[in-house]
Image (cartoon, rainbow, N blue to C red):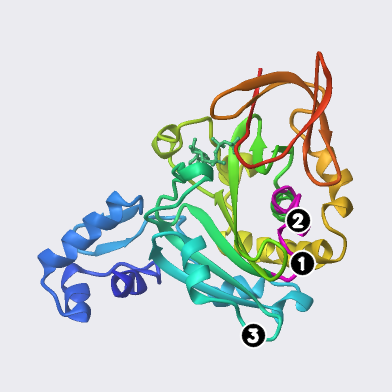
Amino acid sequence: MDKLLGLLADGQFHSGEELGEHLGVSRAAVWKKLKTLEELGLALDSVRGKGYRLGSGIELLDSVKVQSYLDADVDSKVDVHTCFITESTNDLVRAQGAASGGVTRFCLAEHQTSGRGRRGRIWASPFGSTVSLSALWQNGEGTASLEGLSLAVGLAVVKALETLGARDLKLKWPNDVLWQGKKLCGVLLEVYGDPTGECEVVIGMGINVRLSEEQLKSIGQPAVDLFRVCDKSVSRNAVAGQLINTLTHLLDGFGQGGFRLFREQWCEYDAFRGKEVTLMASTRSVTGRCMGVDEQGGLLLETSSGIHVFNGGEVSLRQS
Ligand code: ATP
């Protein structure tokens, strides 16, 4: 499959025969593989007499192109790996392990077969339609120092997408990026290691770049893509590059001063400040008015019994 995609990546037409010759398989076998790719969400043009090519407007990820969008001070600090299909970019970056010399490792995929959200929920990443990006960050200060990191990552995503023309983006605590109440991006942080010392933080994010109406409708909640937000095509390689820029700067800053440094900016994008919301845990829910977040990234909720602080983990926020 990787070889086939490698051949199609040039955007030109290729006949079934030519593809079969390169891959050492029959035309029928090529056709079967192309069908599988279409089932994964890849749009293909097929024209009688010419063959197959990537659907118009599809831009595959390319680490060299991603690197061309990196800021000069970021370029030397990151290692960028792209692949076509993987189970989960969070798992992939973790399996690749930490890079040496203070370099942060980033992995991107065209499609995740088991992309996940919080608490095992499914994250949809149709082939070539999203930017699924994960970073591996090593931190020697223990898990307490990571409080608020997932909120700060949401902010880094907003900043990256703003450089590409997105406007009116909002953050839903703890870290979803919304546009007009629809979800544009999700973030999943996973922490491994010593709660009091050396730990590995896997920072995963999925940004919808361009999905079909049907793909958006099949997601279990209102969702949107960058194409609709910006009212124009946006390069996936540029999205990836800008995300790596803002995330690298964020991790530098977060390592120095934690979420405290980002709290004020986060509050500027808060989708629910002053609004009535319901916080849901697995067995109970509580309703109140959103009062922003504290310096550790905890949500401040005003209820009839006063202001209470809630931390991420098992809690989900919904507008009442
Ligand atoms: P929470 O408020 O707890 O974060 P959430 O429902 O947004 O709730 P996440 O774990 O952040 O949960 O994300 C998973 C959910 O996001 C899925 O259950 C689905 O509703 C939605 N989702 C899945 N794929 C996409 C996508 N590509 N774009 C937008 N939303 C998606």
154 shown above or below 11: above
Who comes first in sequence, dot 3 or dot 2?
3
Residue 154: x, y in percent? 70, 49
The quadrant holding residue 199 is bottom right
Question: In the drawing, what numbered circle is on residue 121?
Answer: none
Q: Secondary structure at mark 1?
A: loop
Q: Residues within 10 Å of mark 1 (few under 14, many from 20)?
A: some
Question: Disc 1, disc 2: CB below 8 Å?
Answer: yes
The image quadrant where one finds the C terminus is: top right
The quadrant holding residue 302 is top right
The stretch of residues the image draws in magenta is 139-154
**Residue that label 2 marks:** 144
Return the residue nearer the eye: 207 or 214: 207
Who comes first in sequence, dot 3 or dot 1?
3
**Residue that label 1 marks:** 141
Q: Amino acid at mark 1?
A: Glu
Alpha carbon separation for disc pair 3 and 1? 18 Å
Q: Secondary structure at mark 3?
A: loop
Residue in the image at 43% along x and 32% along y: 217
